[in-house]
Image (cartoon, helix red, strand yellow):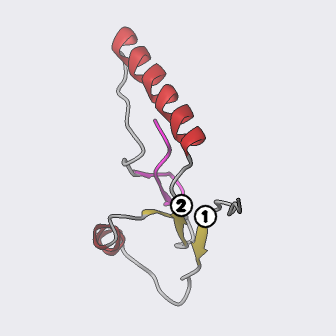
Amino acid sequence: MLTVEQSPLVVRLHPVVKKTDEQFFEFCQLNRDLHIERTATGDLIIMPPTGSATGGRNFKLIQQLVNWTDQDGTGIGFDSSTGFTLPNGAKRSPDTA
């Protein structure tokens, strides 16, 4: 069986195209089936879906995070659909936060 390395596709747009936060959000809404992030320099990162092994590990990680936030009560958790704006301006969506 052939396997394909699942690495992200990086689309370099800067300095030719600059997207505002609103344009980036709209672009993501138009492409809901894709997992899209943006670097601090404006490059788009399109992530492939995870395989079953990675998906299973992520599921267990989320379970542990939910258990911790419920027990500790001092924070909140987010899944991989949540985008965060980092201090350098990048828009990233971690597996769990």
Q: Which residues are magenta?
A: 84-97
Choose the circle earlier in sequence order: 1 or 2: 1
Is the N terminus in the top left, top right, bottom left or bottom right quadrant?
A: bottom right
Kindly indicate the quadrant of the structure image that contains residue 13. bottom right
- 81 on left or right of 13: left
Q: How many angstroms separate mark 1 from mark 2 (CA)?
A: 6 Å
Q: Amino acid at mark 2?
A: Pro
Residue 52: image location, x then y, percent: 54, 43
4 w.r.t. 92: above or below:
below
Q: Do callouts 1 and 2 mark residues in contact (Cβ within 8 Å)? A: yes
Q: Amino acid at mark 1?
A: Pro
- Tag 2 secondary structure: loop
| Crowding at mark 1 (Cα within 10 Å: few <14, some 14-19, many 20+) | some
- 58 on left or right of 29: right
Let me know if residue 66 is in the magenta part: no
97 w.r.t. 24: above or below:
above
Residue drawn where x is 56% and y is 86% of the image = 15
Residue 21: image location, x then y, percent: 35, 68
Image mark for residue 8: 1
Residue drawn where x is 35% and y is 27% of the image = 76
Q: Which residue is mark 2?
A: 48
Residue 77: image location, x then y, percent: 38, 30
4 w.r.t. 52: above or below:
below
Give the dominant element type of the magenta stretch: helix, strand or loop. loop
- Tag 1 secondary structure: loop
